[in-house]
């Protein structure tokens, strides 16, 4: 074992006790009143940050489940970021990688946690859409459409955008949910539900930069050979124009 200075031993004991007071003894010589303040301060701060990032999850769990889950987060997970703004991201990682009876009781928990985290991540993203240069005139078919970096096409087995305290599905619907969560030029975070074809279109734009609208729709047609090419082009252009109105597509590249 590596020998540590006494003050570090005290720090490790104190932090272990604060995270897990039932199973880790506090350092000797610290007044219980002070320990109580530290324990409550850390627990309540972390619980507050998680609640603000995952309000739907908080509304679904009862008080006992919520407190147990926060305690499990403190005890079983080691965050890598020191920033409070990233507590939600760390909690998402905890939800995706740690075994928890509470999480297991809600089959939609991990997808819902991801969906709620995406909303927060887009809200605090420093990107300024108004700084992205686009052409004043727009020819989507012959020029390169720009997909907003603040528009995330997402696919979930559960209809996470409907889940609430009053709606908690026991199993995933037969059809997955395709959702675009985005932040517009007014810095409002919104979402729209889209069909699988639109989701594929946006995925192509996300993965392959530099394609014109015509090339994007041809690539989409290759992925959907069962759909007539003419229908792909007619509905595809109309869809891209609608996405432009929502700041999901920002326009066409200026160079």
Image (tube, rainbow, N blue to C red):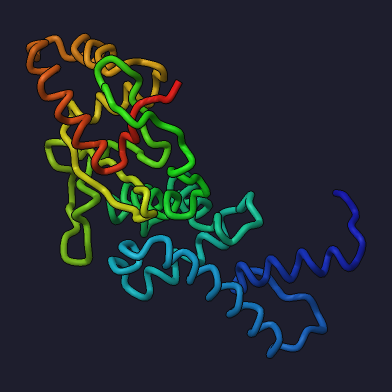
173 or 139: nearer the eye? 139
10 or 130: nearer the eye? 130
Q: Residue at x 78, y 84 (%)?
A: 30
69 or 90: nearer the eye? 90
Residue farthest to the front?
136
In the displayed structure, 85 sits above or below 240; it is below
Left or right: residue 237 compared with residue 77: left
Q: Residue at x 30, y 69 (%)?
A: 59
Q: Residue at x 39, y 18 (%)?
A: 208
Residue 196, position as x, y percentages in the image: 18, 29
Left or right: residue 26 compared with residue 85: right
In the displayed structure, 38 sits above or below 2; it is below
Left or right: residue 156 compared with residue 76: left
Residue 234, position as x, y percentages in the image: 10, 20
Q: Quadrant of the C terminus?
A: top left
> Which picture quadrant has residue 174?
top left
Residue 136, position as x, y percentages in the image: 35, 32
> Which picture quadrant has residue 166?
bottom left
Q: Residue at x 52, y 49 (%)?
A: 126
What number of labels is visible? 0
In the displayed structure, 6 sits above or below 92; it is below
Residue 161, position as x, y percentages in the image: 23, 52
> Which picture quadrant has residue 28?
bottom right
């Amino acid at each position: 074992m590596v020998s540590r200075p006494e003050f570090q031993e005290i720090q490790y004991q104190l932090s272990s006790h604060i995270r897990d007071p039932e199973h880790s003894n506090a350092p000797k010589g610290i007044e219980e009143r002070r320990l109580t303040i530290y324990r409550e301060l850390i627990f309540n701060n972390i619980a507050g940050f998680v609640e603000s990032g995952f309000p739907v999850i908080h509304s679904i769990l009862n008080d006992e489940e919520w407190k147990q889950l926060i305690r499990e987060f403190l005890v079983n997970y080691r965050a890598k970021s020191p920033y409070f703004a990233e507590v939600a991201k760390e909690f998402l990682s905890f939800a995706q990688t740690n075994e928890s009876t509470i999480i297991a009781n809600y089959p939609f928990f991990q997808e819902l946690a991801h969906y709620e985290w995406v909303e927060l991540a887009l809200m605090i993203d420093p990107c300024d859409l108004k700084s992205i240069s686009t052409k004043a005139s727009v020819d989507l078919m012959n020029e390169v459409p720009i997909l907003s970096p603040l528009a995330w096409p997402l696919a979930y087995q559960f209809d996470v955008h409907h889940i609430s305290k009053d709606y908690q599905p026991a199993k995933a619907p037969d059809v997955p949910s395709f959702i675009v969560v985005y932040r517009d030029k007014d810095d409002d975070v919104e979402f729209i539900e889209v069909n699988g074809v639109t989701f594929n279109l946006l995925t192509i734009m996300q993965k392959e930069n530099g394609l014109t609208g015509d090339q994007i729709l041809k690539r989409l047609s290759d992925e959907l050979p069962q759909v007539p090419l003419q229908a792909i082009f007619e509905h595809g252009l109309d869809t891209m124009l609608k996405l432009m109105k929502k700041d999901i597509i920002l326009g066409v590249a200026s160079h």
